[in-house]
Amino acid sequence: MALSLDAIALGVPHVEAAHAFYTTVFSPTAIGDGQDAGLDLHGTGRLLLRQIDALAADAGMSPDTSGFRGCVLSVIVDQPGEVGTLLDAATANGATVVRPAKKRIFGEFTSVYRAPDGAVWKLAAAAKKDTRPSDAPVRLTETAAYLGVTRPKAAKLFYEALGMDVDRDYGDKFVDFAVTDGVCRLGLLPRPALAKDAGVDERGHGFPAVVLTHVAASREDAITLLKAVEPAGGRVVTAEARTGQGDYVGYFTDPDGQHWAVTVGA
């Protein structure tokens, strides 16, 4: 049973407002209903929006959060003009620009904004120049979560023990994992480097308001995955069946304290 990043659960102060914001910016497809409702990000993974108090309680945390959360969410689009289109949509709906849209030192065209719910998002273009008119709506080609960790090489070993395959490995500078259709990419950077890249102060504490989510094929697969967490250096927070629903959900943290949920049938 291999871990994959199938969805990103965001803890937000107001679910309806957050739903309106992300729907306007990313033009996703709504999926599911009730607590498991989410947004399909153009087949590159899912975004789940939960009341922050409820998400924190499920993860065994206080909902208090302050400063940098140690996680930067990212989307990749085809060309620079589409980065500008997404940034304009975000700022028109309450986001704050952290880094304006521009070409960086190594030719990468990026921008960073802070959403009204507090999440930091990086927008990046796969190409250096526009070669055609931008799509409307803009189509995302990849979604990712980048974690600020103590040592990427050590964190890599934990995720490899849970079945993830490394894609790019630059030692303690940067590591990420192979991605397949329908899931998000996971990347690891030293926390100071991640904060610097995003243009934010690295200081922060409390609940990160992000729970990375894996959808297992069965209850047995979920239990097997959770059993591998503590021998690999993580910590199982809860492992239980949801009352009345019959599907399974468990929570764990990686060695750097990032929260994960393992669900069945979400």
Image (cartoon, rainbow, N blue to C red):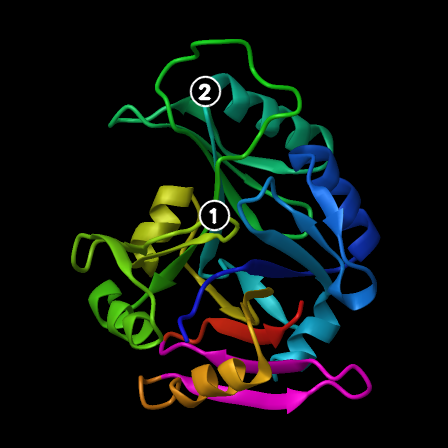
Residue shown at 55%/51% (left/top)? Answer: 45
Query: From what the image shows, is residue 97 above or below residue 57?
Result: above
**Location of residue 43 (image quadrant):** top right
Residue shown at 60%/22% (left/top)? Answer: 85
Query: From what the image shows, is residue 17 above or below residue 100?
Result: below
Q: Residue 170: percent from the left, percent from the top?
A: 17, 52
Outermost top residue: 132
Q: Nearer the viewer, residue 9 or 246?
A: 246
Which SS class for mark 1?
loop
* Label 2–label 1 contact, CB within 8 A: no
Q: What residue sits right under mark 1 in the picture?
A: 181
Outermost left residue: 171
Amino acid at the residue labelled 2: Pro
Q: What residue sits right under mark 2 in the picture?
A: 80
Pick the quarter of the image with the C terminus.
bottom right
Amino acid at the residue labelled 1: Asp
Q: Is residue 247 left or right of residue 177?
A: right
Pick the quarter of the image with the N terminus.
bottom left
Magenta residues span 234-255
Q: Residue 140: percent from the left, percent from the top?
A: 54, 34
**Location of residue 57 (image quadrant):** bottom right
